[in-house]
Amino acid sequence: MARDLEGKVAIITGSAGGLGKALAEEMSARGCYLVLADINVELLDETAAQLRGAGAQLDAKPLDVRDPAQVQALVEGAYHDLGRVDYLFNNAGINVCAELRDTTLEDWNQLIDVNLRGVIHGVHAAYPIMCEQGFGHIVNTASVAGLVPAAAEGAYAATKHAVVGLSSALRIEAETFGVQVSVVCPGLIDTPILESTKYVKFDPDAILKIAPEKPMNARTAARLVLRGVDRNQFLIVMSVTAHLLSWFHRYAPNTSVRLGRIAIGMFRKARRGDD
């Protein structure tokens, strides 16, 4: 792979595992200096050691994206120490698989704090720096659930729709200052979020069996993300199913709603009793 990111700096949140780790692996292979950040300190240290062993240059910082002061310190520290911030990947996220009637306010608040405010905190910290330096690329991880009706993931989808909306406005405003913006909308990716998802009254194994496609390999997903970033693509949609669902919702919305009704019917067959 061409080492075409020599001398550039990328901050990646949620980079101890999953898509964030895969992005780090791909970018380090291209010569990029990495600033890895994650709330899981033990796993972050393991990932950093593994990447350093493969020749990567990086810093690893514990980070809770819910805390704006921590995010600000991370981004400003990277800029101060390294002299530039070329990429910010707002990648940290969580999921709750639940019908809205079963979604608690605690679930809502956790999803909003991590998935939405975490992105806001990253943008708030990095965008002024990128404007000042006259370049940079902000990449926000959303989901196909941020583009289409998402049965049994309404609260999660609400945060991801918000990330897409934020990213679309930011892209228009930022281009004048030389700053690029992309939003990643994958379908299922084989990452730890599949195991860490909170399932409310659903059997996770049954839900995965209903899924229309197998989860995409994380390294494959990372390569697709970086291909889109290299092309300054705004909406980076991955997987055949994700493309089809987003196409239907945009050009045949009534069909999209019918597909959603079919999906919730299938999910409810996998629904467990009150527990």
Image (cartoon, rainbow, N blue to C red):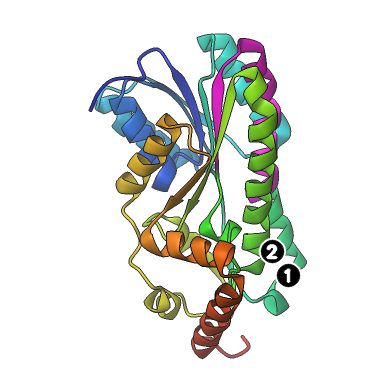
| For residue 33, above or below residue 37 | above
* Residue 107 circle label: 2
Please tell me in which quadrant of the rendered image residue 152 appears: bottom right
Please say if 14 is above or below 201.
above
Is residue 30 left or right of 263 when viewed as pictured?
Answer: left
Query: Residue 204 placed where, x, y %?
Result: 46, 75
Q: Tell me residue 210's x, y (percent).
A: 41, 79
Residue 10: within the magenta?
no
Label 2 sits on a secondary structure element that is helix
Would you name the residue on which mark 1 appears? 104
**As drawn, is 93 to the left or to the right of 168?**
left
Asked if residue 74 lies left or right of residue 232, the reply is right
Magenta span contains residue 121: yes
Residue drawn at point x = 46 percent, y = 51 percent: 237
Q: Residue at x 56, y 70 (%)?
A: 252
State which region is magenta.
114-140
The answer to which of 55 and 175 lies nearer the viewer is: 175
Circles 1 and 2: CB distance less than 8 Å? yes
Residue sitting nearer the eye, 4 or 66 = 4
Residue 41 coordinates in the image, percent (x, y): 49, 39
Main SS class of the magenta portion in the image = helix
Q: Nearer the viewer, residue 31 or 106?
A: 31
